[in-house]
Image: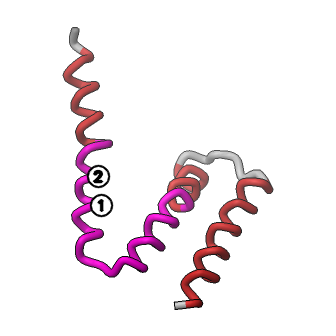
């Protein structure tokens, strides 16, 4: 009833608009840089969760972040 418009609004503002803007931004950069940005997206999400919402900082989570960043550095060093 009352909550349906709110749910739709949140869905549009939080899901559809950011994806549209992200894809529009990717059209303006090189393919290799776009791949790096896409690979960094989960890392940024986890870091925001840790810093803003005080999510746990487990060693496994930090290792995963380090592995993703190291992989990006290794792959981007080849080109």
Q: In which quarter of the image is residue 67?
A: bottom right
Residue labelled with disc 1: 22
Q: Which residue lies furthest to the right in this view?
A: 59
Considering depth in this image, is 17 or 51 the residue closer to the camera? 17
Residue labelled with disc 2: 18
Question: What colouring style does the render use?
Answer: secondary structure
Q: Is residue 3 left or right of residue 64?
A: left
Task: Give the number of marks.
Answer: 2
**Residue 21 part of the magenta-drawn span:** yes
The answer to whether mark 2 and mark 1 are in CB contact below 8 A is yes
Q: Looking at the image, is 37 positioned above or below residue 21? A: below
Q: Looking at the image, is 21 positioned above or below residue 10? A: below
**Residue 46 part of the magenta-drawn span:** no
Residue 60 lies, in percent from the top left, at 77, 54
Q: In which quarter of the image is residue 6?
A: top left
Q: Is residue 20 left or right of residue 71?
A: left
Q: Which residue is drawn at 22% across and 64% down?
A: 24
How busy is the neighbourhood of tag 1: few (under 14 within 10 Å), some, or many (20 plus)?
few
Residue 16 lies, in percent from the top left, at 26, 44
Determine whether the residue tagged by mark 1 lies in a helix, strand or loop: helix
Determine whether the residue tagged by mark 2 lies in a helix, strand or loop: helix
Q: Distance between the residues labelled 2 and 1?
A: 6 Å
Q: Looking at the image, is 8 positioned above or below residue 41? A: above
Tell me which secondary structure the magenta stretch mostly adopts.
helix
- Range shown magenta: 14-43
């Amino acid at each position: 009833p009352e909550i349906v418009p709110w749910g739709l609004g949140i869905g549009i503002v939080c899901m559809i608009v950011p994806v549209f803007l992200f894809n529009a931004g990717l059209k303006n950069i090189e393919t290799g840089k776009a791949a790096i940005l896409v690979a960094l997206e989960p890392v940024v999400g986890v870091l925001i969760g840790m810093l803003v919402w005080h999510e746990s900082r487990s060693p496994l989570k930090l290792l995963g972040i380090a592995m993703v960043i190291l992989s990006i550095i290794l792959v981007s060093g080849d080109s």
